[in-house]
Amino acid sequence: MNNPSAQTPRGLEDQLRTMILSNVTVSNDSQSRGQPAARGQPHARGQPHARGGSVDGPWKFSGPPPSAFTPQSPQSPLTPRTNRGGQQQGPSVAHGPSAFSGPQILQRPRSIQDPLHTPGPGFQAPRQNYHPNMNYTNGNNYQAQCQYLDRVATAEIHQVEMAPEEGSLKEAFRAKVESLCQSALQEGYSGDMSSIELRCFGSLSSGFATKGSDVDLAIVPSWNSSSKTTSGLRVIDRAIPRLLEKKLLDSGYGARLLTRTRVPILKVCELPIPELYAALCEERKNWDELSEEEKYPPPPTPGIPGTNPKGGNKPTGQKPNDENRNPNKTSQLGRPAHSVGTSLEGKTALDSADGKRNDSNAYSQRRFDTPWLREKALGPLDFPKSGVGIQSDINFENPLALHNTTLLRCYCHCDPRIRPMVLFVKAWAKRRKINSSYSGTLSSYGYVLMVLHYLVNVANPPVCPNLQLAWNPAQENADPAKALADTLINGYEVRFWRDEAAIKREASQGKLTTNRQPLGALLRGFFQYYATPGYGVRSFNWMNEVLSLRTQGGIQTKQMKGWTGAKSTLMDGREVRHRYLFAIEDPFEWDHNVARTVTHNGIVAIRDEFRRAWRIISAIGLGIQPEGELLEAVVEMQPIKSPPPTLPPSKVETAESLGDLIKQVGEEGGW
């Protein structure tokens, strides 16, 4: 006979189990403990994937996806995360159970109507539990994402690559400008320099130029044989840049010398519009009327803390930022960032046109009311992007720029996938408006280094060798001592494998890489590397790491280099700000951060765009509604300029006489 009292606990247990299961979902995992993983699905914990996988043809992959896409640890399935710039990063939900043993009990996600977890405006609920860093990607999803990127890249590269005809026109423009510079030297200069050559560097010479790219030119002087210097180092006379500027203006070209840059830059345009040309001529006239002391400020005083010990201007292939043209800093949504901004029409926010400190209230009003734009508004002296013919930047005192260009061109020869990958990333950054060092984001040169870092150090197997580590003195000169001396420029080691004919030959024979991934797969890995914050995949640590192309492994730390806080240096009598929010070491100038122009708002925008790109890519093949097109252009509304705030008049300004002032004070004081 059954005992009723003995069944009471059993009945309560059944009721409790029913209540629990009514609010959970039991995962029927086919990869529970003791069951093998299905073909094409991620391996269970303890069974790592083989890295890479072979490729047969453009879309035929054999083997599982790379180990970089293994399942990740579960996360709280609450609401979409919001980054520092206010942009949503997509919902954060629980990961798939395939990496864990036994059946999984997954808590139901909170309703998006939960008042404690209300998503921001424009949020769309996902069609299924999904997070861009998780691995729901089986072989089919991985292939679909790679195919998508390959299709998009092929179409975009066809639109943005420079045609040979455009290259010929720009070479003719370079020759015209060089001829004018030669004439200016003969007419108005009597120093040690005998002639000037304008040598092309940058993207137009490296092979990474896109349609409409500027012509980057470096001054290469020839010196009189009779001239001598005590130091052995010849320096271009400080009057030369202004001499060339005047000659170009008199010849009808648009010309403007930027002096508040890391190295002097003479900006030139072929067909300036009348308003721009008049403004440039007026600016030049104003400069001519200055005193000699105002035209050429004294050099930095030796021994001042923060002064570059190696002597100031150290050039690079990067286009420098005009320190006084950064916009005021606010977030993308118009919320003020807690940092000091600069710039209104060539003046710092702390200094007015006459050099005196602005009123603090007016500065504070500008700082918090002016929204930050990824693309700064053009001033009367700025060259528009189109409508003024061919544009050029002429660099002075820039010997390393030519070696930087040669290094990039040698990398371009290493593999046929490198050039289209760089062109696509540059086009993407331009569409999303994160490619302007003048506005606080990153120069195109910086994005080239980011791509090369991934291809050399992260792709597995590497797509190309490290050309600096592959340097062999015997390749350059029979005498190793002479080879070492010849590759030392301004105290920097300019040493890399630069035999372009040999690189092309070995690349054509397939000796430089065993990586056979298509372009789409490389782009997928590139965006994942810079977008994902770890979670078991290899990723870039934006907070602590420095991209270092010359280094084995490609990474140093900010602590190792002492790049842990912003610094100021004096260059030609002016203060230049060096930031390290984003750190990319120049391949030759190890003490120069290519990303020094990136501001707080700039780094937020860059990281947001990488995350957005990865969310779009990783949603392919999963039935997830994308948040937009990968190459959708960012359109910013220019803010309406408001008049400067009017401060209340002081007592002295309102008092008509000393007696009235005493009367006012007496009435307020009660006497």
Image (cartoon, helix red, strand yellow):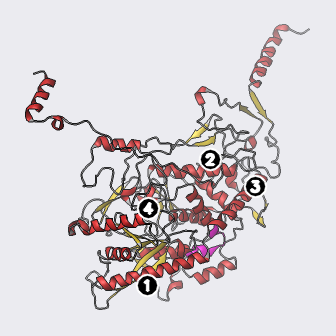
Q: Amino acid at mark 4?
A: Asn
Distance of label 4 from label 3 (alpha carbons):
37 Å
Extreme-bottom residue of the structure: 226
Q: Earlier in the sequence, mark 1 or mark 4?
A: 1
Q: Earlier in the sequence, mark 1 or mark 3?
A: 3
Q: Amino acid at mark 2?
A: Tyr
Residue pointed to by mark 2: 535
Alpha-carbon neighbours of circle 2 within 10 Å: few (<14), some, or many (≥20)? some
Instruction: Give the label, 4 or 3, closer to the camera.
Output: 3
Residue pointed to by mark 4: 593
Tell whether label 4 touches label 1 (CB within 8 Å): no
The span shown in magenta is 409-420
Distance of label 1 from label 4 (alpha carbons):
30 Å
Residue pointed to by mark 1: 481
Q: Amino acid at mark 1?
A: Ala
Q: Which mark is residue 144?
A: 3
| Secondary structure beneath label 2 | loop
